Image (tube, helix red, strand yellow):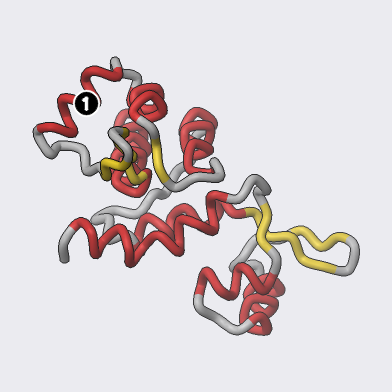
């Protein structure tokens, strides 16, 4: 699978996480898990999916699906532990766009913008050029985000 195919195949899953709210409806959860809404309700009742019942509806926290998202993105080891700093880092993917600018990418990776441009030139970072600007798909950084989770888990054990 090429990088381009990888991005296209998984962009829909990431789009669920880009919304500003942190909750899913039963229907949205069903779309994400590719399951019927009744199946989702059944899993909630069996406490396999965490949810809050309020105003006659279930509200399902998105963060519990981070493990499924990373597993679907072909990670070798799914995330098992979330610490508060990692949850804050994950919110980068909750922004309304699925791409970074060079500056946004530099902020996320905590490096200088020139470093990002050099990595783009050496194909270490995949990007799209439009009107003389680089646009960098966020999905390619999901692996580095999960790596930081796994690294923290190893240090904690």
Q: Is residue 156 visible?
A: no
Q: Quadrant of the C terminus?
A: top left
Identify the residue at image location x=42%, y=58%. Answer: 69
Say what secondary structure mark 1 lies in: helix
Residue furthest to the right: 55
Give the percent coordinates (x, y) of residue 148: 33, 34
Given residues 128 and 1, the one toward you in this image is: 128
Badge 1: residue crowd in 10 Å (few <14, some 14–19, many ≥20): some
Give the percent coordinates (x, y) of residue 116: 24, 26
Vertical arrangement, residue 135 with respect to residue 114, above or below: below
Left or right, 45 with respect to 149, comes to right
Given residues 154 and 76, the one toward you in this image is: 76
The picture quadrant where one finds residue 155 is: top left
Vertical arrangement, residue 119 with respect to residue 38, above or below: above
How many numbered discs sit on the rendered protein? 1
Identify the residue at image location x=27%, y=45%. Answer: 128
The residue that disc 1 covers is: 117
The picture quadrant where one finds residue 142 is: top left
Give the percent coordinates (x, y) of residue 95: 54, 41
Vertical arrangement, residue 101 with respect to residue 42, above or below: above
Vertical arrangement, residue 69 with respect to residue 56, above or below: above
Q: Quadrant of the N terminus?
A: bottom left
Give the percent coordinates (x, y) of residue 71: 35, 60
Residue furthest to the front: 131
Identify the residue at image location x=39%, y=37%. Answer: 100
Given residues 142 and 154, the one toward you in this image is: 142
Left or right, 33 with respect to 75, comes to right
Identify the residue at image location x=26%, y=41%. Answer: 129
Q: Is residue 47 visible?
A: yes
The picture quadrant where one finds residue 30 is: bottom right
């Amino acid at each position: 699978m090429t990088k381009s195919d990888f991005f296209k195949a998984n962009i829909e899953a990431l789009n669920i996480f880009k919304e500003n709210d942190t909750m899913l409806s039963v229907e949205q959860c069903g779309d994400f898990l590719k399951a019927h809404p009744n199946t989702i309700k059944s899993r909630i009742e069996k406490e396999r999916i965490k949810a809050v019942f309020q105003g006659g509806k279930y509200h399902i926290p998105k963060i519990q699906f981070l493990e499924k998202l990373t597993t679907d993105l072909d990670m070798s080891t799914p995330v098992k532990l979330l610490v508060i700093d990692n949850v804050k880092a994950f919110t980068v993917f909750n922004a309304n766009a699925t791409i970074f600018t060079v500056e946004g990418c530099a902020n996320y990776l905590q490096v200088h913008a020139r470093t990002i441009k050099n990595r783009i030139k050496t194909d270490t970072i995949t990007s799209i050029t439009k009107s003389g600007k680089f646009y960098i798909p966020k999905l390619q950084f999901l692996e580095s985000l999960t790596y930081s989770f796994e690294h923290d888990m190893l240090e904690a054990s």
